[in-house]
Amino acid sequence: MSVRRPVAWAVAVVLFVEAVGVAALNWFLAVVVDRQDMSLAGLDPDMMSLSSKIGGVVFGLYFGLCALVALLVAVRDRAPAGLGRVLLISAAVVHGLLGAFSWGLVGPGAFVVMIAVLGLIVLLLMTYDAREAPVAAAQRPEDGQGGDGSPVSPPPAPTTP
C-alpha cells in the first residue's frame, strides 16, 4: 500500500486549516489594533489595521491555493507539476522559515508544528518524485528477450577513434 494519497490528503487538510487560521488571526489582530486606536512609532492605526487584514487575506489565499494543489494531487494521484509544484516548494520554504522564527518568538511547540507541516509537504513532494524504472531497462531481462517475448539485440560495442 502506498502512503502517497493519505499524505496528500493530510497536507490538503492541514493547509486548508492553516489558511483559515492565518486569515482569522490576522483579521483578529486588525480588529484589536482598530479598537485600541494607538499609534506605533507614528504609524496610522487605520493603515496598520488595513494592512493586517490585507496580509491575512493574501496569506490565507496563498495557503488555500497550496491546499488546493495538494487536494488535486490526492484526488488525481499524480505528482504536482509546474506552478503547483512551485507552490508546494514555496510553502515548504515558508514553513521552514516560520519554524525558525517561531522558536524564538512563540516557543518550541509552535516550532514543532511548523516543522511537522514542513515534513508533510516534503514527504508529499518526495513520494510523488520517485521515478519508475525506465521502459528500456524493463525490456532487457537476463534471457535476452524483451517483456513481450521479442528478442532484444545487445547494446552496440563502444568504438574508439
Image: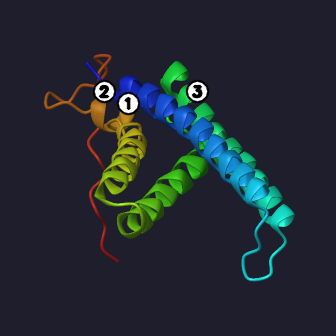
At 53% across and 33% down in the image, what residue appears? 17
Q: Are marks 3 and 1 in contact (CB under 8 Å)?
A: no
> In the image, which is nearer the foreground, mark 1 or mark 2?
1
Q: Amino acid at mark 1?
A: Val
Residue 71: x %, y % from top left:
55, 27
Amino acid identity at mark 2: Val
Q: Which mark is residue 90?
A: none
Which of the two labelled residues, at mark 3 and mark 1, occupies the earlier sequence position? 1
Percent of width and height locating residue 119: 34, 47
What element does badge 1 sit on? helix
The foreground one among 39 and 157 is 39
Distance from disc 1 to disc 2, alpha carbons, whole Å, reads 6 Å
Name the side, left or right, on which 20 lies relative to 61.
left
Marks 1/2 in contact by CB < 8 Å: the verdict is yes
Q: Could you tell me how far apart the alpha carbons at marks 2 and 3 are, in whole angstroms?
A: 16 Å
- Quickly name the residue at label 2: 3
Crowding near pointer 1: few (<14 within 10 Å), some, many (20+)?
Answer: many
Mark 3 and mark 1: Cα distance apart in space: 12 Å
- Amino acid type at mark 3: Leu
Give the labeled residue for mark 1.
7
Residue at mark 3: 72
Q: Residue furthest left?
A: 142
